[in-house]
Image (spheres, coloured by chain):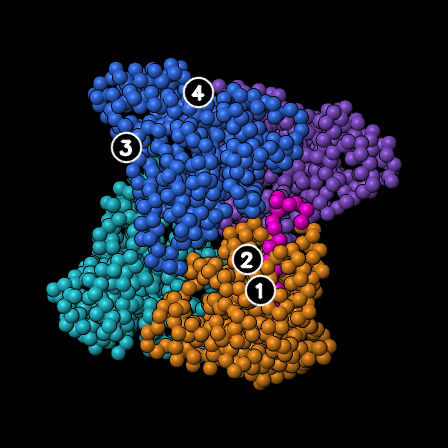
Chain colours: A purple, B orange, C cyan, D blue
Amino acid sequence: MELNFRSDNESPAAPAVFAAVAAANQGTAWAYAEDQWSALLDDAFSGLFATPTTVIPVSTGTAANSIALACVTPPWGSVYCHRNAHILNDECGAPEFFGGGIRLVPVDGENGKFSAGALETLIYQNSGHGIHSYQASAVSITQSSESGTIYQAGEIQAISETARKQGMAIHMDGARFGNAVARLGCHPADITWRAGVQMLSFGASKNGCMAAEALLIFDNPDARESAERLRKRSGHLLSKMRYVSAQLLTYVEDDLWLTMARHANKQAATFADTVTRHPGASLEYSVEANEVFVKWTPDGFKSLENAGIQFLTWPGREDLARFVFSHCTTEQETTFLCEALTTRKTP
Amino acid sequence: MELNFRSDNESPAAPAVFAAVAAANQGTAWAYAEDQWSALLDDAFSGLFATPTTVIPVSTGTAANSIALACVTPPWGSVYCHRNAHILNDECGAPEFFGGGIRLVPVDGENGKFSAGALETLIYQNSGHGIHSYQASAVSITQSSESGTIYQAGEIQAISETARKQGMAIHMDGARFGNAVARLGCHPADITWRAGVQMLSFGASKNGCMAAEALLIFDNPDARESAERLRKRSGHLLSKMRYVSAQLLTYVEDDLWLTMARHANKQAATFADTVTRHPGASLEYSVEANEVFVKWTPDGFKSLENAGIQFLTWPGREDLARFVFSHCTTEQETTFLCEALTTRKTP
Amino acid sequence: MELNFRSDNESPAAPAVFAAVAAANQGTAWAYAEDQWSALLDDAFSGLFATPTTVIPVSTGTAANSIALACVTPPWGSVYCHRNAHILNDECGAPEFFGGGIRLVPVDGENGKFSAGALETLIYQNSGHGIHSYQASAVSITQSSESGTIYQAGEIQAISETARKQGMAIHMDGARFGNAVARLGCHPADITWRAGVQMLSFGASKNGCMAAEALLIFDNPDARESAERLRKRSGHLLSKMRYVSAQLLTYVEDDLWLTMARHANKQAATFADTVTRHPGASLEYSVEANEVFVKWTPDGFKSLENAGIQFLTWPGREDLARFVFSHCTTEQETTFLCEALTTRKTP
Amino acid sequence: MELNFRSDNESPAAPAVFAAVAAANQGTAWAYAEDQWSALLDDAFSGLFATPTTVIPVSTGTAANSIALACVTPPWGSVYCHRNAHILNDECGAPEFFGGGIRLVPVDGENGKFSAGALETLIYQNSGHGIHSYQASAVSITQSSESGTIYQAGEIQAISETARKQGMAIHMDGARFGNAVARLGCHPADITWRAGVQMLSFGASKNGCMAAEALLIFDNPDARESAERLRKRSGHLLSKMRYVSAQLLTYVEDDLWLTMARHANKQAATFADTVTRHPGASLEYSVEANEVFVKWTPDGFKSLENAGIQFLTWPGREDLARFVFSHCTTEQETTFLCEALTTRKTP
């Protein structure tokens, strides 16, 4: 047993995905995304999302996010996102770099999500300085959120409408997009373009791939040029892109991505149940995807570590820990974790 | 009577300063800051500040601030400043632009000032993500502050020590530096390099000049190269710099700058007294320099406007207005304003 | 006598221009280019150029050039300009900085000018790498050129047509635009928008102003937003812009700018005649504006210096020197220079 | 038979490299280059290069080049490189982007190489404008060059000395570094740090890997911080870096990289021999690595294409074509190509 609940980033690639990479490793193929696998991406994702979709494969989510935001934000534009957003806290300023000095504006909100109302109020508060301040240019929603929660289609729709009234573009950071779709049981379109989202960073690395992400642009073929220029210029146009594209194709084939996300979500839900019934520990956020944030005592967490369980104590919060479940977390491992928690009283 | 209390930015140049510009307009002079006036700046300011000082004349405070911050902050570095800071709210991202995508981090604090303690706490809170987040690289203090308040030498010292412990550089935005020195009655060195400040944006435009600011670098001649390169590269190396330098020389001669600042401060104090004694209006911040922020009713402010008085209603706050007093505000004008307020009951 | 032929950048402001600044220094005025002088600029220049013109006043030509180029060039775009262009050699990368890493591409051509044919060939040669290379986005013509020569309207027209076929924008660096119009005796429109130029850096500092330049945008009001954002963001929105705008208004009133340019051109022509008749010295470029490039022996130049004459020996070329004539060069000074050359045999 | 001589970028990964990736795909591993494979890189390359070496694994050569140059070049600095350099022509301005608007300066030279003398002359020619122009900050040498030629250790040494005298940093783009070492039969150190090279973009993707490159920094551990920050900030810190690091470790184990490069070089040499003996075709550059540039008639090239042979006709040169040989080019394929050329007279 691995007992590694630190991050889904630490999981290996799923066997089917790896087999696709092996299959792509036969013979020569055109370089720089002109290969036969990359050529299939637009069709595959247009089908999946039921609308014409431009696919820009890259190898990291930071690249997808930053290219997306730089495409729709002038250097003097700002991007509104949740205070906990990955683009704000965990990308070392990549959006600012790609965008030529854009600014990210944190929006507060409970459960790792912000509301259309909070967004609107903040935009209004920041609007009094005219040309002396940043221009509100885009909004970025993380789905599922950094707190393991999920925006309902209606919530996204409301945010999009608020943004659109201001002439702002709408981006979704979908590093864990599969977990959201799996949980909601909706069509992928329902929480993206049908709800006003124009660009999606479609994540796959965390959910069964080696290094495969894609920037999806819905129904706007003219945006390809900028996105491709930015990808090349930032060093993200892999010469052997076939390996990334082959992963993506297999990942979305036969709902593999949803099957894996559903599995991860289920493990998280099982553990969340256990936490809820525990006398000392409690959930920091409602558990809706594959992440479980547990509030407990430092000694309590230590006792789990002593049992060989690996997880992340939150930076600056010794009473908070994150447990992440992935496509390869076994039921055995989840059971072990649940039992370890249950048998430990709060020290 | 002008009755213009909107901003000291709207005042004309003082007669002595204008005379200096006229005197500089005789014959030819070397271009690009190699003229005879510019050549005197280092000595003049080294004398004024009682330490070797490198002077980089520019024509706007935004240029001085941005060059300073870009000199000491890598693109992945962050600059801590007050939530109301001009660099944060009123420069349309110039620091981010000059710095190649640096980030400004707002620090909260009452009366337009932040404390060493608040700074330390926030740096600590932001420090858990390592290389995935920005590196705390500089702190910027506005003196006098955007709220018309003043940092005591000891407060600056404490902030500097906190910053230095983190390896951060210390910058002061002195757009209204003269008003602070005039109020404190201290040596300019006491609230700058002796208190740990390494770079000062020395403002003069608001206090009697036409367009004259200077970035001062204390006791660090090696920093000149970067600052001069950034000045040139941002289009701020005027070919006829003599006109800026001539203003600066006269501005600091015979304490002209302090005489003018003292006058402005005095007018503000007079008005602040009146506000304090008014039954309906009140001061939003303590009045320590040349700005007075008044809390009152919208109808009250309207009645002043009807009396021909010009001032700034704060963006997004209809119950708050700013009155600024300058070197050229006459006592008559101040008296008129005070009487106008006094005779108006709160509607 | 000054005997300073180093640069027109070293000349003082003309009396009328200085008087306009003095007149503007009365009372308060709205800050940040919302003053009454700035408000007149669009009309004044629309009249002068006989087409709706957006005026963005700034204090340096580098700012005007860089804002213009950044407005029309994406970060992955390139700007074609002459190998001797000021933007390429003398702005320390300001266009690259403002444009987020654009590239300048030098075009060769005799007499400081390039032809439409040379431009077309070079664009074609650089076009084979597709998305792996820069996108040809703009062309910049200097008028009058860095070599003191002048593009005829037809030459500009041909360059514009070549550029337009590639979807490129057309910019003119008019640091010495007045000298060109004075020489050609044409309407300013004839060598700008009527010949396809979309943006003009209209220079005034070298020809009688203190620090006054303007970016002119012809017949494209939508471009104002980007230009103003870039001006603010680069620290070039002076709080007391009235002083710049007042200069510009007087400069173009009653053809003052052309009168001054004509005077400077005439002095240059007089000296050029003398050079032509000299047995040892010769002209490097044809003299069409206010600059004279003289080829001679190092000892010859030294003998002029010994006579108290100041000029610029060209960097890296000890057999080449530049003599610049300005609005304030007196006929006496020109005569002295001519005689000094004539009486000196080539050593 | 593939008969694909278009580019070594189109080759698949070598079996041993792929096996290493498969082996790395077992169980969980720490994310963001804190895995057990990445932990071995510094030791492996320090051993290979016989000096303390900092290894920054990335997935593209453009990333390695751009991070390296941005580390050693201020925004106002220029990088000298050959006119045919990949960083100049094929990275869509990535160095300019990473470096915040740096400039690349093309140096001319025969056979795809430039000399220390040509470098020195050009630096001198560009040095006359002082702060008004770029500062010469770095030099970048491509080894083996874009023309398939190789710098001798002494040539590199001479370039390094010239650069060092100017305070410039020395970078090597080693996209095909293995081919150079294989050809020279020298120690890798001989043409890198022992010859003055401070940073090497060590390429592996073209020579048997899927997507694996590394920036190597010799004997300068302090440079790690900037390089890692830039990697993260540009989106190049893969969460599952283990897959890249595993490739690199196997690639340099037991001289696999040299074995593969030697094979490719040998195929190229065989074809070069054939070209030399052909009555109509000729070599454009001397063939020293794995690339062969052939000068022939357009109809000649067409006849090869008709035989099913794939290669690259050079952009803008219909009389020039490039044939690249890789680790997986079979002798059969080479023989087929040679015979195809031999049996075709020049049309």
How far is disc 3 from disc 2 in space, using C-alphas? 48 Å
Residue C122 painted magenta: no
Q: Nearer the viewer, residue B157 or A171?
A: B157
**Tag on residue B72?**
2
Which residue shows up at 60% across the image and 68% down it? B193
Which residue shows up at 28% across the image and 30% down it? D284
The mark lying in front, picked from 3 and 4, is 4
Residue that mark 1 sits on: B198
Q: Position of residue D135 (x, y in %)?
A: 41, 54
Whether label 2 touches label 4, CB < 8 Å? no
Q: Chain of mark 2?
A: B
Q: Which residues are magenta?
A: B127-144
Tell me, yes or no, if residue A124 can be seen here. no
Q: Earlier in the sequence, mark 3 or mark 4?
A: 3
Q: Chain of mark 4?
A: D
Q: Could you confirm whether marks 1 and 4 are on the same chain?
A: no
Q: Position of residue C173 (x, y in %)?
A: 33, 58
Q: Quadrant of residue C14?
A: bottom left
Provide the secondary structure element on which disc 2 rests: helix
Q: Position of residue D137 (x, y in %)?
A: 42, 50
Whether label 1 touches label 2, CB < 8 Å? yes
Residue that mark 3 sits on: D317
Which residue shows up at 67% across the image and 77% down it? B272
Kind of residue at badge 1: Gln
Whether label 3 touches label 4, CB < 8 Å? no
Residue B131 painted magenta: yes
Residue that mark 4 sits on: D328
Kind of residue at badge 4: Cys
